[in-house]
Amino acid sequence: MSDKAIPHPSVFVEARRLELIKGYRVHESRTPAKPVRVVTPSQTVGPFYPQALIHPGDDDLSRKVLDGARAQGTPIVVSGQLFDETGKPVRGALVEVWQANKWGKYEHPADQTPEPLDPNFKGYGRQLTDPEGRYRFVSIKPGAYPNPGYDNWFRPPHIHFSIFGAGVMQRLITQLYFPGEKLNDIDPILNGIEDLDARASLIARQLPDEADGSLAFAFDVVLRGSGETPFFVDA
């Protein structure tokens, strides 16, 4: 990716244009204005999410096969805790993650970009938080990629998070961003969050490297309350 591919920040200064992009409007437009039938009410998943749905290796996005060959790219470890509005750790919550590979390519039929797929990269994972609300994933640092339409602006490297938990009435979706990425400063999705503290909460904290040399990042999530992590449209 060359610097010429990066749009100038002035592209997004117009509030009306930013509002058009914010929240993945292309996905929001798929929702009917009026329900065809009565909408099924949301209910909490409860405290007993089936542990049998979590398999060995589900915490490793960098390998398709348990103990198999690792994908290309910079190895990373992402860990953190889930908290409720009182600061109490949330145990037994299901955390699902998915991301692009080192070239910014998703292994998904809807991704039609010309970047290569990595035969060893799984790109998704899931885990239940432990009694202290902690989770940990092994992966490869994702690459940036162009977003078709909207002048093909580049999305910064990021990881998608989906969270189910007791007392949560619907799936919560957010995104982790990496510190020091210049694309963070001009990304309309990230910068569509007006509260600067809330926006900053989506930038992972870099930790000392792991023993094997992997880059380490911390990303905590607050599910409710005044310090709630910003959540996005399910997309």
Image (spheres, rainbow, N blue to C red):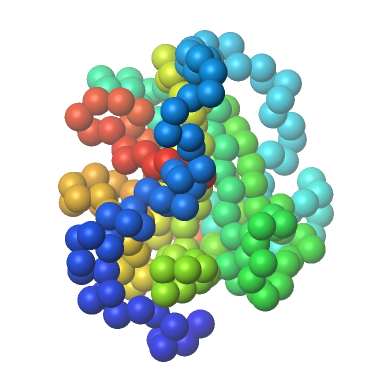
Q: Residue at x 77, y 51 (%)?
A: 64
* Percent x, y of residue 124: 64, 47
Q: Residue at x 58, y 11 (%)?
A: 48
- In the figure, 170 relative to 184: above or below? above
Q: Is residue 178 visible?
A: yes
- In the figure, 115 relative to 81: above or below? below
Q: Nearer the viewer, residue 151 or 167?
A: 151
Apparent side of residue 31 relative to residue 207 in the rendered image (left or right): right
* Percent x, y of residue 68: 81, 54
- In the figure, 26 relative to 39: above or below? below
Q: Residue at x 48, y 24 (%)?
A: 35
Apparent side of residue 1 relative to residue 194 in the rendered image (left or right): right
Q: Is residue 212 visible?
A: no
* Percent x, y of residue 117: 73, 67
Q: Nearer the viewer, residue 175 or 56?
A: 175
Apparent side of residue 56 relative to residue 61 in the rendered image (left or right): right
Q: Residue at x 23, y 60 (%)?
A: 16
Q: Nearer the viewer, residue 148 or 66?
A: 148
What is the tally of numbered marks visible in this picture?
Answer: 0
* Percent x, y of residue 154: 44, 71
Q: Nearer the viewer, residue 160 or 23?
A: 23
